[in-house]
Image: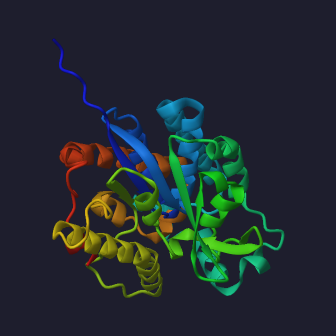
Amino acid sequence: MAALQSAPKRINLAFQGGGSHGAFTWGVADRLLGEPRVEIEGICGASAGAMNASVLASGFAAGGRAGARAALAAFWRQIGEAGNRSPIQPSWLDQWLGTNRMDYSPTFLAFDMVSRLFSPYELNPANVNPLRDVVAANIDFGAVRGLSDLKVFVCATNVRTGKIKVFENKDLCIEAVLASACLPFMFQTVWYEGEPYWDGGYMGNPALYPLIYNCKSQDVVLVQINPLTREEVPRTARDILDRVNEISFNSSLMREMRAVHFVSSLVAAGRLPADEFRDMYVHIVEGGAPLNGLGASTKLNATTSFLTHLFEMGVAAADAWLEANYDALGQRSSVDVASIFL
């Protein structure tokens, strides 16, 4: 008699933001959606992570796992087509060096300098946002709002109060996703119900508490595309600014991870009742040195070839993570939270 197939393990996903590096998350999501041994209960995302989460949910509502994978592929294909036409491209020297960076691209350098001197209100008074059309074409927000078997949480930062705003399924709309991806040096502030919002990464990249409070699964899988640690101390002005951005965008995540570790320690020691406080199991899928070494300028490289490269990196990373850590799901964290985040 054939052995009975065990039920899939339920997990929650946390998607970080990071510009075009979100294509790495696409690869991770594609591999997990194709894995019958796991089932996704909830997703929380910020910026590019919010777009991945919303596109995935829209596709899932239309056609289950296969629909989600197809929707993500269509979304990133459209991003790549737009990126191929963008004036911000790697120069011939960048291409020759094979770094995928745009450190020698005249258009990137000009954009980088001008965006530090003038605001989007001065540079783009008509408030043209090319992401709006791509998001509108690839996400059925009505379907996502009506979705009951996949919970979606999108993070944005309230400009006025400095507090995090988490949009749930019932709240999701194009303004919510654009607010989550609103870098204030690139885009004008996004307004939702009379409140101004910027990129969600400032206050939650992404937030974990919506998954902890609203989902039954104890397993949170963080798809990390912003490195926590860099061995080299930055020396150039651009490298210093890039590292400042990395630290600030990771700060809220580190605080939440400390809180998760603290509560889990108290539960394990019997100082908190286990029936009221759950032990959370933390897992991380990350690209390691190849992803961390790409450089900040590559986050604006949206060419099809680079996005495909990131996608393949994500698939490989998720495959390796499943191979090494599947048995830990539902049992324990597969990373040492204390050593990484404390």
Q: Vertically, is 16 above or below 157?
A: above
Residue at 69% from the left image edge and 71% from the top image edge:
187
Residue extending furthest toward the right: 126
> In the image, 283: left or right of 103?
left
* Location of residue 75 (image quadrant): top right
Q: How is the image coloured?
A: rainbow
Q: Nearer the viewer, residue 278 or 256?
A: 278
Q: Is residue 113 visible?
A: yes
Picture coordinates of residue 30, whole percent (x, y) = 43, 41
Q: Nearer the viewer, residue 288 or 293?
A: 288
Q: Quadrant of the C terminus?
A: bottom left
Q: Nearer the viewer, residue 38 or 239?
A: 38
Q: Is residue 52 visible?
A: no
> In the image, 211: left or right of 129?
left
Residue at 47% from the left image edge and 79% from the top image edge:
245
> In the image, 173: left or right of 24?
right
Q: Quadrant of the N terminus?
A: top left
Residue extending furthest toward the top: 1
Picture coordinates of residue 160, whole percent (x, y) = 67, 83
* Location of residue 67 (image quadrant): top right
Q: Vertically, is 43 above or below 60?
A: below
Picture coordinates of residue 38, whole percent (x, y) = 33, 39
Residue at 34% from the left image edge and 55% from the top image edge:
221
Picture coordinates of residue 248, whole percent (x, y) = 45, 80
